Image (cartoon, grey):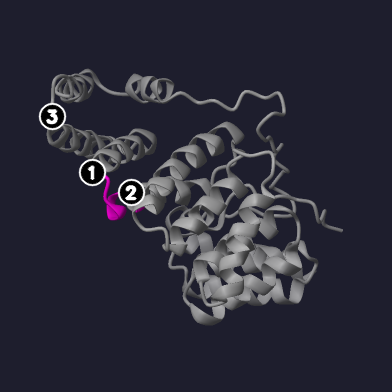
Amino acid sequence: MKNKQTIIVLGGVLLFAALFFFGKTVNPAKENKQVEQHHAGDGHDHGIDFSDLLLKAKSSLLAEKLQQVETIEKQLQNSSTEEKIHIYHRLASFWKDSVGVFEPYAYYTAEAAKLDNSEKSLTFAAQLFIDNLFDEAEPSKQNWLATNGKVLLEKALEINPNNDSSKIGIGACYLFGNISENPMEGILQVKAIVDKNPDNLYAQWVLALGSKKSGQYDKAIDRLLIIVEKQPTNLSAILHLAECYELNNNNTEAIKWYKVIKNVIPNPEAKKELQQRIEQLQH
């Protein structure tokens, strides 16, 4: 009998990426362990300082790359606002394209967006943090991602108070980011948008992941089915759907949706592991 309180620590987007590129699957019943959840005021230290993340990222650089990025950093001194925006974008590009490290890329993109102060740049930067928040299992990193995403979206809402996507993103920060003693605050905010517009699939997605995280698999399944009906090629939603059925002890439906994924994943190793998962559920 599977433990219905199991929390999936590897989100659908990340797991799909693993399936697609590396053929790595995780059995939600056996491999995933419940993550200790923390919240503000629980006595745990949630703080991650960007300077620590940057120091760690720099420690892996070759001398030539380190000199290159520190030369760009020095240009921030005595620069105008417009110049700083350009320099922050250069730093973001360095960390994304040259060395492939997410945290500095997102941070510098966010710093540029704050100075630019346009809704487009603020929401783009915020989404970087929130997309990674859905897949992050470490509480302190969740807090860092959510805190940064929330700040950006609040600035975006000052420009356009009617942007539901920004409101949903803030709700996701409360729900997944350990930034509040009352995660319900995030759920209610997103649910209000779904009640107004059930076809808002971003809101349905956030609520589905929230239900899955809390072990409410029936509710998660209902919302994921809405998404899959509207977006039949959304493999992240399909993968979460299959996992929720498996965790809810409905092996027939789990097998059905795992087969859907197996039939479209080109990676042979992924196909093999999905087939093994299916065969385990058949016995």
Residue farthest along the right direction in this orientation:
1
In the image, the segment drawn in magenta is 116-123
The residue to which callout 1 is attached is 116
Q: Which residue is mark 3?
A: 80
Residue lying at the far bottom in this picture: please name it: 229
Residue at the spot of label 2: 122
Dot 1 crowding, Cα within 10 Å, few <14, some 14–19, many 20+: some
Q: Circles 2 and 1: CB distance less than 8 Å? A: yes
Among numbered discs 2 and 1, the one appearing first in the sequence: 1
Q: Quadrant of the C terminus?
A: bottom right
Rendered residue at 71%/50% (across/down): 7
Does residue 232 show up? Answer: no
Decide: few, some or many residues near mark 2? Use Cα within 10 Å; few <14, some 14-19, many ≥20: many
Above or below: residue 20 compared with residue 135: below
Which residue is pictured at 19% across the width and 37% down the height? 85
- The alpha-carbon separation of the residues under discs 3 and 2 comes to 20 Å
Residue 143 falls inside the magenta stretch = no
**In the image, what residue type sits under mark 1?**
Asp
Q: Quadrant of residue 194?
A: bottom right
- Which residue is at a point 76% across and 71% down the rendered structure image? 251
269, 175: nearer the viewer: 175
**x, y (%) of residue 228?**
55, 76
- Hey, what amino acid is under mark 2? Leu
Look at the numbered disc 3 and give the secondary structure of its residue: loop
Residue 167 x/y as whole percent:
49, 57
